[in-house]
Amino acid sequence: MRKSEALSIVADPTRNKIIRRLEEAEKAAYSDLLDSAEHVRHLTSTGGFNYHLNFLLENQIIVKEGIVYRLTYKGKEVARFLKDVDQIWNRLEPTMRGEKMGILSWAEKFQEETGTTMQKSTSELHGIELILDEKKVIGLLAQEDCNREFFRDYRSLKVEECKLSLKPSEEKTEKCSELVVSHPDLTYYISPQLLGVSFQFLSAHFNEAHVFAVKKKPFPFLIRATEMGKDYDGCAFLVAPCVF
């Protein structure tokens, strides 16, 4: 393996996630690894995932035993290297970015870690500065902006009460069903993929995440690392609702 290929393992979110998942679980089936990767990158097909999985197999980073995969000795060394890189970056990041990261920096980090393409300029929603993704369904904002009047009616949702549901939707001329996350207090829904990617990003950087919504009518979901009123040096997310 060339140096450039070795470094690409660290840089690529999908390969990175496969190795981290196997280091955590020791062994995992294909579906488990695919599910883990989909939370950090919007995969429209399994082709891209299979490319990265085969790369790791061909370079003896992982090995397949029956229907499960595990790390080789080389893979365990790479996993240890990833942990070392995380620790070094956590010490270096404040110096590289300054004492406080702005939302543009958080958007760059979010894009790098999840593969979600973010816009390069800011937008405004009721005076709140946002960085939107290219589809304009997920927005990143400074957590202190959650104290604005716009969020007055937002209330915390118990995540354990959420459940997956299939709802009919119409795309072009074909009727189909869409998988959504529902909550008994709401009449509208959220995409499980968008909830997962933002919730996991906040959990990874701040060790916790909370979901807020307006119960009386459809509003964007708010996902932040702490309860309302508790400040932290980081970002929050607004996610567009699904309405049927």
Image (cartoon, grey):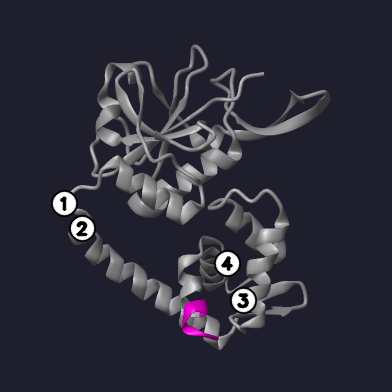
Residue reaching furthest to the front: 120
Q: Secondary structure at mark 2?
A: helix
Which residue: 53% across, 53% down?
40
**What type is the residue that disc 4 sits on?**
Ile
Residue at mark 3: 56
Query: What is the C-alpha distance between the residues marked 3 and 1?
Result: 37 Å
Residue at mark 1: 99
**188 vs 131: above or below:** above
Query: What is the C-alpha distance between the residues marked 4 and 1?
Result: 32 Å
Q: Secondary structure at mark 1?
A: loop
Which residue: 23% across, 66% down?
91
Tell me which numbered mark, 1 or 2, is placed earlier along the sequence: 2
Q: Is 147 in the magenta?
A: no
At label 2, counting other C-alpha atoms closer than 10 Å, the crowd grade (few under 14, some 14-19, many 20 or more) is few
**What type is the residue that disc 1 sits on?**
Glu
Tell me which numbered mark, 3 or 1, is placed earlier along the sequence: 3
Which residue: 44% across, 55% down?
112
Tell me which numbered mark, 2 or 4, is placed earlier along the sequence: 4
Callout 3–callout 4 Cβ contact below 8 Å: yes
Q: Which residues are magenta?
A: 1-5
Residue 164 x, y percent position in the rendering: 66, 35
Task: Report the quarter where the C terminus lies.
Answer: top right
**What type is the residue that disc 2 sits on?**
Pro
Residue 149 x, y percent position in the rendering: 28, 16
Which residue: 36% across, 31% down?
130
Residue 173 x, y percent position in the rendering: 82, 23
Residue at mark 2: 94
Q: Residue 67 falls in which quadrant of the image?
A: bottom right
Query: What is the C-alpha distance between the residues marked 2 and 3?
Result: 32 Å
**112 vs 74: above or below:** above
Tell me which numbered mark, 2 or 3, is placed earlier along the sequence: 3
**What type is the residue that disc 3 sits on?**
Leu
